[in-house]
Structure formats: structure tokens, C-alpha cells
Amino acid sequence: MIVTSVNHIAKMYAGTWIFENISLQIHENERIALIGPNGAGKSTLMKCIAGIEHVDKGNISYKKELTTGMLDQIPDIAGNLMVAEVLKQSFHEVYEIEQQLKQVTEKMADPEEQADLDKHFKKFSKLQDRLEEVNGYAVESKIKGVLHGLGLEHLSDHPFQSLSGGEQTKVGLAAILLEEPNLLLLDEPTNHLDMEALDWLEEYIKNYDGAVVIISHDRYFLDAVVTKTMEIDSGGIEEYKGNYSTFIKEKEKRLLLEFQTYQDQQKKIQKMKEAIKRMRDWAIRADNPNMHKRARNMERALERMNKIERPKLKRKTASLEFTTAKRSGKDVIIFEKVTKKMEDRILFTNLNMLVQYQERAAIIGKNGVGKSTLLRLILGEVPADGGDVRIGASVKVGYLSQKGLTGYENWTVLDAYRDIAKVEEGEARYRLSRFLFFGKDVFQKVDNLSGGERTRLRLAQMMSENYNLLLLDEPTNHLDIESREALEEALEGFKGTILVVSHDRYFLNKLMDRTYWLEDQQLKSYIGNYEAAKEKRTQLG
């Protein structure tokens, strides 16, 4: 059954059409991925479906009594509520019934209300029946389950306003999941989640009793949960059955077919033009009006032909390519019995790690266990509290932090790039264009850049130098899918050593040949990518 029908809608911002003539249908229990490049209008379309934004053309119809819920990246919570109280707001009717039950109970115990005891008892029974209908007795267990699944248990008694932006976003996700709307709209739900929370959310979405529409750059997540993929691009939308990987295969088939159709038509057009030219030559030589007429009729047919535009086989993406310094020694990073404390908490103790030349290794684990701290130890930004951290011979380190480029807030993009790449302005602008900074973009201030732009600018800096060790902290954060794929291609061609901290399981599976799992203050090493490490852990119990 169709729960939502989007009919020929269009949306304009500042005199520019974001999209036009968009139509789609959402059916019960569908799991739909809404994908496309940054700026294509995915979030705007989702807000239109949620009723948050109005449409400038067309209409959106909904199944009768449909409930809709959309995840805002940071929910607007008034007052100084604790996290648990914020989540209780998802069960407004339940807590209203409980409040009424409390009032009725007090009246039933009041001697002055004994004359109306029968009336109070009937109301009490009705309220209890309604509480059972809305499954009110399961509220506390539901809240605990979602808090546990998303790794938020330790924050339940914290004021919401005291949380970081990432923590507030996770609380917003918990709240919308607890509301259980018939149509669940999730914009980047996997942001800020660690591996265990990602696994939990996947299972939750797969078993969700309702329709779900997801915007996400997490390809592993999309492969795990979605049943239909819709790509919005250049103002239009295309629908594909299946998950992200199926979409990639089907899109390639469609593009090749479209290109073949385009080429066939171009051949036909060329033949018609040649035939018209020959016919006119013959008509002139034979002074034959009928032949002139036939040539003109053929020309009109050519003019009326519905011309197929040349398909775009590849969109312009960042052109990333690392160069490599002379090779380092065999042993690149050495940790021997390393202990590190953070305030009064021990992050890890007696930790050993050996990363060798040309290895591609990942460090994974829950949020807060010390993954980024390991990178900072390698960089020498923080000291070890015990043990020995060493860098091998002839190692030249390139570092990408989670925030992308930092320390250049009042600089322009161009000046920040040239601070590292010692080249003339024209050459710098040409190189920056390969990282999708065009024209006036290079004169933007760094502190006005988005997260993805900061990452691309830092990568541009890094690729102007010759490193043989790359330390990458969540490198795919803030990047759209196409930029992630460009980064993966660049890293595949890198000849040095890579150590990465990431929650991007698709990225880890594609590139890594060793996985370090940090948990319980220890670092466990597994040969292979994320999937291989996960399977090995399951076998070992």
C-alpha cells in the first residue's frame, strides 16, 4: 500500500530551481535510500516529504492518519531537560495518561471524594485500558533498549544542553526512533555512531514496522538495510530496485545502454544529413522539384526528431593523487608496552603495535576508547605515560585530523594551500580546481568552509608533499559518496604506509589489510579488513 505519493513537485531557492517535476511513491515497509551529490536537494526533498518545507509546484499526498517523523541533525530542545526526560517526550500520550492516573488515584484515596468513588474507579479503569492499548508499560524498557543500542546509557542523567553536537544528534536519533512513526525519515543517521551502535541501528531499521527513507553516505549501512535506491541529480530523480551495490551495477548498465542509444541515434542523424545533402545535389542536377520536396520533408523529420542528449558517463569529482617520498625503513610505527591515561581514566595499558612498510592498517573500536589518542602519540602531540613509542627510519608523516584543515581560520583557501604548496597563484588555482575549488571559491575564508571542504583542502595540501606514512583520522567524514570513492582510488595508488581510524566499514573493507581492535584497554590485531576481523572475533567468541 502507498503511504506517501509525491506528484510532480518542484522547489526553488533564491530564484534557482533545486529540483523540478519530481515524482515518487513510498510504500509500506519499504527501506529507501535517497542518494546524490552534495547540493542536489536530498535534504530539501526529505523536508518537503516531512511537511517542514513547502513545495512551489505539485503536491504530496499521504495515507490517512499517517504519522511522520524526521531526524533533525540537532533537535530543538527547550529548557534544561535531562536526556532521559527528552526521550520521555516521545511518549507524550503515555505520560499524560500516567499523570491522569496519578490524579485519579489521589482522588480515590481522598475521604472527601468517596461519594464519587464509583466514577473515579471507572475513569481509572478506562485510563488503564488506554495505557495498555498504547503499550505504555513497555516505555521504560524501550527507552533503556534504545539508550543501550546507541551507546547513550551513560548520558541519561546529563542535561541535554551540556552535550556535544554529536551527542545531541544521537539523542535526537533515539527520540525519533522511540516515536515509531509510520514514515521514518532519517538524514545521515549514522553520523557519530561507533561500530556497535551501527550494527544495532541496522538491525533496528531492518525490523522497523513502517516505511523508512534514508539519506546517508555510509555505503555499508545502505547495503545492509535498503530495498530501493533513488538518486536525485541535476534536478531529476531515478529509481532503482535494490541496495547501494545493486544501484551501482544497474546505473552502469543504464548509462551504457543510454550511451549506445545516443550513439545509434547520432549515426542515424548523420545518415539522414548525408541523404538530404545527396538528394539536394541530385535535385539541382536534374532540376527535379519533387526531389527538392522529398529532401525538405526529410529535413523536417530530422528537425522533429526528439534528440537524445549525450549521457554524462562521469560527473566531475575531486581528482586526488598522492605522491610518495622515498621509502621508509621496514618498521614504521613501534609501540612497546605503552600506557596512556586521560585525566583519571586509563585508556590502554601495556599496548603493543608494529606497523610495517606498505601496510594498510585500521584502528577501530567504540567512541572514547582512545583511537585518536593513538595517532596523537605517534605524532608526538601527547606523551605516553608508560612504555615506548617510536617512529622508524626515514619516515615522513602526513596527518589528516577529523576536522580536516585546522589552524588557518582567517586565511583564504588559496593562501592556506600555498602555505604548504610553494607554487605560483595560477598553478595553485589550477591544482585547487582538481579538488573542486573553482573561481571565487579559492578566496573563501577557511573558517567559512563546510566539513567536507576542509577535508578536501587538507588533502590538497597533503598531496602537494611527499609522505611515506599517512595517518588519517575519520578521513571519509563529511565527504559525499563520490569524494569517498575518489579518496579510495588515490589511497589504492599510494606506495607508502597507511594507518587510519575510521567507522566507515565500506572504506575499511575496500582498503585495509590489517585491523587493530581497541577495547578493554587492549589492542588486538587481526590480519585482513573489517569483515575478516569481525568474523574472526565471532569465531573466537
Image (cartoon, rainbow, N blue to C red):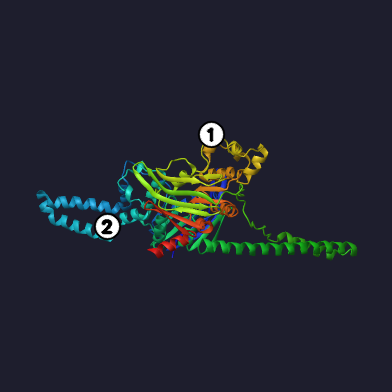
Q: Residue furthest top?
A: 410
Query: Is 94 in front, or is 357?
Result: 357
Residue 85 in sight in this render:
yes
Asked if residue 43 lies left or right of residue 286, the reply is left
| Label 2, residues with CA under 10 Å away: few <14, some 14-19, many ≥20 | some
Q: Quadrant of the N terminus?
A: bottom left
Asked if residue 175 lies left or right of residue 409, the reply is left
What residue sits 90% from the left and 65% below the top? 286
Query: Is 131 in front, or is 526?
Result: 526
Instruction: Name the front one of labels 1 and 2.
Output: 1
**Looking at the picture, how far across and down is residue 464, in whole percent?**
61, 43
**Looking at the picture, how far across and down is residue 505, in whole percent?**
48, 57
Q: Quadrant of residue 394?
A: top right
**Looking at the picture, how far across and down is residue 105, in whole percent?**
16, 52
Task: Give me the C-alpha separation between circle 1 and circle 2.
Answer: 53 Å
Residue at the spot of label 1: 410
**Looking at the picture, how far across and down is residue 189, in whole percent?**
44, 53
* Amino acid type, callout 1: Asn
Residue at the spot of label 2: 136
| Label 1, residues with CA under 10 Å away: few <14, some 14-19, many ≥20 | few
Q: Secondary structure at mark 1?
A: loop
